[in-house]
Image (spheres, rainbow, N blue to C red):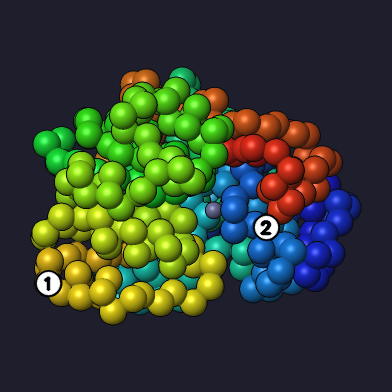
Amino acid sequence: MKAWVLNNISDIEYKDIEKPQISESEVLVRVRSVGICGSDIPRIYETGAHNMPLVPGHEFAGEVVEVGDPFHSQWVGKRVGVFPLIPCKECRQCKQEKYELCENYNYLGSRCNGAFAEYVAVPFWNIIELPESVAFDEAALLEPSAVAVHAMRRVDPKPSESVAVIGLGTIGLLLTAVLISNGIKNIYVVGNKKFQKERAMKIGIDEAHYIDAKHENVIEKLKDAGIDACFECVGKNETISQSIDSVRHSGRVCLVGNPYSDITFDKNIYWKILRRQLVVTGSWNSAFTHSEKDDWHYVLNALSDGRLPIKDFVTHRFEMPELETGLKIMRDKTEDYIKIMMVM
Ligand SMILES: [Zn+2]
Ligand SMILES: [Zn+2]
């Protein structure tokens, strides 16, 4: 089969490799759509992956074409989304079904072969059936959308509360859409690009709730608004400080953005955590338990009933051989994008 193989840092090639052999506990998924994640850029160009050579790609959906266990044969031909984290199911976190916190996990596309390929071997446990109404592109957005749902649920804002989202990259925009889908009305978003403003307005944010980080005083504006819960989706000193500084007493701050570098606070900011009794929490990955209540089902249900209009978050679509075109747009920031999707 054809696959993109990361041999070493910055050394990725499209070539023929052996089609994966599946074990009894796995299914073979034919990839139909796979998104490029922000994390794929440093993985491919800066840090490398955990194990190399490796086929990257973890935000994907496709069709089951083979099953390892004949007992699962009714799954052949089904359209599925895939939870890319393969938990050990033995550690303390796994025992509590907090698989996203597994202490000894495997991961499709970062630790074992993923989806920038024609086929992927996926544990049967990791697949979720797609409703008819959910297209493959949308299903490839399940993973980052579930990450957004997970972040929302970490601080669980109520419809009566005011919420801020700082940073309108892919996760920030998805999170905004997820908050709207959950009935949160008073959402302030902070962006720094015209394109981000347009996108935010398209999903329902009005002029008065958009804050332009380049030309406006973010903290002042957010303080005036009285923010109960703030989501930091950038991962930089300045925006993390803004998040802490802008929430009201007893407010909650959820740190979502992956850090660019070391994070340090002014003493003044640190004091605010204490004196205002803030709750500062992190969010990591998403909850996938096969329960109707997990983050993945939230997204699937919201997509099915039209509450989550994220279809046009796919700003670019390329055929699989063009992967490098997509990677370079993201690496070199040559064009505005939300999600770049590879299709087969
Ligand atoms: Zn990702
Ligand atoms: Zn575990």
Q: Relative to 226, is 311 on the left or the right?
A: right
Image spot of residue 35 (x, y percent): 62, 42
Q: Image height check: is 128 above or below 101?
A: above
> Which is more foreground, mark 2 or mark 1?
1
Secondary structure under the numbered disc 2 in the rendered image: helix
Q: Which residue is mark 1?
A: 275
Which amino acid is tagged 1?
Arg
Q: Quadrant of residue 340?
A: top right
Q: Which mark is residue 211?
A: none
Instruction: Give the Cα distance between marks 2 and 1.
Output: 39 Å
- Number of numbered discs on residues: 2
Type of amino acid at the residue the image marks with label 2: Ile
Q: Residue 41: which disc?
A: 2
Residue plotted at (80% across, 43% down): 325
Image x and y of residue 238, in percent: 42, 63
Instruction: Give percent across and percent down for residue 326.
Output: 74, 43
* Quadrant (top left/top right/bottom left/bottom right) for the C terminus: top right
Neighbour class for label 1 at 10 Å: few (<14), some, many (≥20)? few
Q: Which circle's residue, 2 or 1, is located before the other in the chain?
A: 2
Left/right of residue 80 with respect to residue 6 in the rendered view? left
Q: Could you say which is closer to the camera, residue 119 or residue 312?
A: 312
Residue 127 percent across, percent down from the top left = 48, 46
